[in-house]
Amino acid sequence: QQQVKQSPQSLIVQKGGIPIINCAYENTAFDYFPWYQQFPGKGPALLIAIRPDVSEKKEGRFTISFNKSAKQFSLHIMDSQPGDSATYFCAARLDSNYQLIWGAGTKLIIKP
Amino acid sequence: DTGVSQDPRHKITKRGQNVTFRCDPISEHNRLYWYRQTLGQGPEFLTYFQNEAQLEKSRLLSDRFSAERPKGSFSTLEIQRTEQGDSAMYLCASSFRWGGVYEQFFGPGTRLTVL
């Protein structure tokens, strides 16, 4: 099953809060899990990524938690700022051809 | 600017017309991908090239769609006899193997509106 299920569809958080976006997959042939950030009218930009042999990765205020046995991974944004307001996509890459399978996206709004 | 560039950024056309989009990847990136993104959805894979070879095409890529990457540099995506359902953002990405990973870098996209 080549699907990545992402939730929630939208999220509103106060400035300084910690939004959490979750993704789940079924296919075990995925070998790389990136998160992309997209602003209106722009292409997606790589934010942070993780391989399945690592349970957590942190880059600045962004952290990915990865649970291989549950086939779930999530993005946490620490000390969120209004400038973080964007649509966030999780994705999973097929190890056979490096094709990215994308989640449906989460529209995040950080209120001042 | 050393990022992925796409041209045009916006295209409005009438149903039945042909359109062509161009993507210039990051220099020395040997892989180039085309995606389609509709409002409120994640990108959907269309096709990808390794150098000049088109290695895979999605079933979303009907006979009206054709992509080329002559000489393994820039790429073009042509849509013939456009339909209203073709209205979407067309995204191009390029990648290069570094540290065992092909990270994909996206261009700003071409927004197509078919009237």
Image (tube, rainbow, N blue to C red):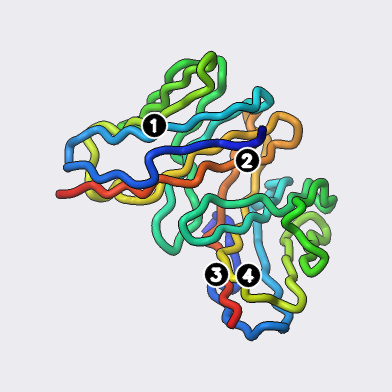
- Disc marking residue B85: 4
Residue A102, how many percent across, how many down?
56, 42
Question: Do residues under tags 1 and 4 come within 8 Å of each other at their CB atoms?
Answer: no
**What kind of residue is marked 3?**
Arg
- Disc marking residue A59: none
Question: Do residues under tags 2 and 4 come within 8 Å of each other at their CB atoms?
Answer: no
Q: Secondary structure at mark 2?
A: strand
Quadrant for the C terminus of chain B, please.
Answer: bottom right
Q: Do badges 2 and 4 share one subunit?
A: no
Pointer 1 residue: A75
In the displayed structure image, the side of residue B20 where residue A85 appears, left or right: left
**What kind of residue is marked 1?**
Leu
- Disc marking residue B111: 3
Question: Do residues under tags 1 and 2 come within 8 Å of each other at their CB atoms?
Answer: no
Residue B101, how many percent across, how many down?
63, 31
Q: Secondary structure at mark 4?
A: helix
- Figure quadrant of residue A33: top right
